[in-house]
Amino acid sequence: MTIESTIESLAAQGVHSVLTQFADMHGVAKGKLVPLQNLREWVQTGAGFAGPSIWGTGLPRFGKRSEYYARVQLESLRPLPFMPGVAHAVCEGFAGDEALETCSRQLLKRQLQRLSDRGWTLWVGIEPEFFLLRRDDSGRWRAADDRDQLDKPSHDLKSIHRNRGFLEDMRSTLTALGFDLQQIDHEDACGQYEINYRFDDALAAADRYMLFKLAAHAIAEKHGMTFSCMPKPFAGSPGSGLHFHLSITDAQGRAIFTDEADALQLSAAAYHFVAGLLEHADGLSAVCAPTVNSYKRLASSHSASGTTWSPVWKSFGDNNRTCVVRTVAGRIEWRLPDPSCNVYAAMAATLAAGLDGIERGLTPPTACHEDLYQRQLSGDTMPEQLPHDLGAAVDALADDRRLIASLGNDYCAEFIRLKRLEWAEFNAQVSDWELERYADGF
């Protein structure tokens, strides 16, 4: 469609404004409302923002490149059911009329171009897990549903019934936005849910997840709740992941990760890709699990529900959820990411690591055919663990020169700078636990 025909079509649907949305370096949606009739400007030049006011742009306070321009991707425009008269637009960052190196969507596009040069397409299925929270009278965060208290709450139908208003609004809104829904269920923790929808090509999948979060935040607020992407809000309960199901097809549509003659139905390319993920797993942790709280999820701790799927060890196995890489009949499930990540950056880093494995012909360790949590209890030698905290993960990324060179020095330098500040700020805090343990203890 042309710009003029898009304006005409949207205006006929009652649209008067465009919500120009992009992601800052933390993966948080940012943007502004602009008039539909000026769509040509938003597509060709972009909606303007003060660059330093956005996390992670690295732009100066003055000069030609101090302004961040969010350029509308014309094909992404669609009316928002929960904002009458407004159409949503995916945008990407430019400064000084050049693609911005620190824009995470541009970051992903550069990695996808490497695949396109081979005639390959990356397909990604994303599994969004999240919590529905509220503050109690004392100001502490709790599960929004006070009666969601089962010892083993997975697939609890009573909670689904009590929260059917939110879930039905999500179903109808996502359907109207073009999501092909597959299932909605209560997850392993009290207050935790998962909504699954059909896979897509990588860029569309990342755009769709950002739209999913935008809708979920608005609908949860309508129902007096908070949609939370915090990886692990409650100690003793499972955390939320954002698993990536990865497959690649060639120009003829053939699955390059699949070899039915192999014992695990994996091709040589798939093994190389897995090896790349495992080789760069420490640095990838910083991008895929980018918060202090992420490492509360990435711990082999007891779960009140009696089950934990936390991908703690750098290993892979056939349909083995205790590994960070789970393979299933020619598909790779990357279980490291959590919902606090910038989905564009996490996907770009994942692809960069996997392609490094393919290009260098890396060989993964032997596939794991056992429950690693049971193996840990037996005292046997374990695979190497992922970093234990954000500080170690960021240091690992800083030391991974090959991954940084692939992603881009500008993006990684700004990311490492911000995350080291976050880690230092956390370490300067005094927690309730410390006060209770030490205030009168000596």
Image: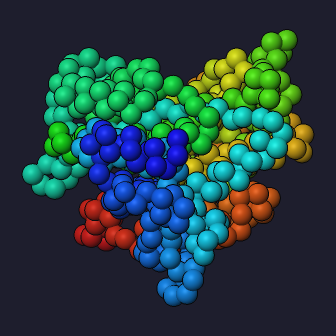
Residue 308 lies, with reference to residue 113, above or below; the image says above
Residue shown at 79%/29% (left/top)? 250
**The quadrant where residue 239 appears:** top left
Apparent side of residue 239 relative to residue 260 in the rendered image (left or right): left
Residue 84 lies, with reference to residue 404, above or below; the image says above
Apparent side of residue 6 relative to residue 282 in the rendered image (left or right): left
Q: Is residue 377 visible from the viewing direction of this image? A: no
Residue shown at 36%/55% (left/top)? 36
Residue 136 lies, with reference to residue 305, above or below; the image says below
Q: Quadrant of the C terminus?
A: bottom left
Apparent side of residue 344 relative to residue 121 in the rendered image (left or right): left
Colouring: rainbow
Q: How many discs appear? A: 0
> How far across and down, in percent of the image, does residue 302 sit?
43, 35
Residue 147 lies, with reference to residue 62, above or below; the image says above
Apparent side of residue 285 relative to residue 239 in the rendered image (left or right): right
Q: Is residue 394 visible from the viewing direction of this image? A: yes
**The quadrant where residue 138 appears:** bottom left
**Residue farthest top in this picture:** 261
| Depth check, front residue: 401 or 388 | 401
Residue shown at 53%/66% (left/top)? 45
> How far across and down, in percent of the image, does residue 244 sit?
58, 35
> How far across and down, in percent of the image, does residue 304 sit?
35, 32
> How far across and down, in percent of the image, does residue 422 sit?
47, 68
